[in-house]
Amino acid sequence: MLEGLHCRSSMSNELKDEIMDQATIKQNGWDKMFDLMIAYKERRGHCNVPRRHIEDGIKLGEWLHRQRCLKRKKNLDVDRKELLDDIGVAWDALSEKWEIHYRLLVKFKKRKRHSIVPSTHIEDGMNLGTWLNTQRQQMKKG
């Protein structure tokens, strides 16, 4: 067994990491990943995990991306989909990200009584200023 691993030493670190991640996911199981999702939501207030996010040494963002892909292909177990629905997983990550920023803008406007957000303004850890500038530029383009 060790000889086989030694022969594969020329394998890229990225590929080794991916293989290890897959083994970890299989070893810890779907329930462990789901528990990490719950912990993430409790800490961040949402389930829109960035794809490159690592939680407790495990690529939680990649795992969520795979769940979304499975759902899109209609291969996600119904019970697992319901569990993810129950904690608030958004299946369309881009729409969810837009909604989060919009809610932050509403919060900002309620507090400041205007929507002139400085381009560098951070609201609840999100770069609201950059997002709003992007929205305005896209509006001008039509």
Image: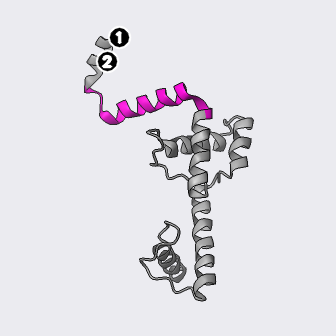
Q: Specify the amino acid type for callout 2.
A: Leu
What scheme was used to colour the molecule?
one colour
Work out whether 26 lies above or below 58: above
Residue, x 64% and y 83% (percent of image)?
110
* Nearer to us in this view, 20 or 68: 20
| SS assignment for the magenta stretch, majority | helix
First to last magenta residue range: 10-31
Residue 80: % across, % down: 69, 37
Quadrant (top left/top right/bottom left/bottom right) for the C terminus: bottom right
Q: Name the residue under label 2.
A: 5
Regarding residue 48, the answer to whether it shows in the image is no
Q: Is residue 12 magenta?
A: yes
Residue 70: % across, % down: 62, 39
SS under mark 1: loop
* Nearer to us in this view, 132 or 120: 120
Q: Mark 1 points at which residue?
A: 1
**Total number of numbered discs in the rendering:** 2
* Nearer to us in this view, 140 or 119: 119
Q: Quadrant of residue 19?
A: top left
Work out whether 1 lies above or below 31: above
Residue, x 53% and y 76% (percent of image)?
135
Tell me the number on the disc at residue 81.
none
Circles 2 and 1: CB distance less than 8 Å? Answer: yes
Q: Specify the amino acid type for callout 1.
A: Met
Residue, x 61% and y 61% (percent of image)?
96
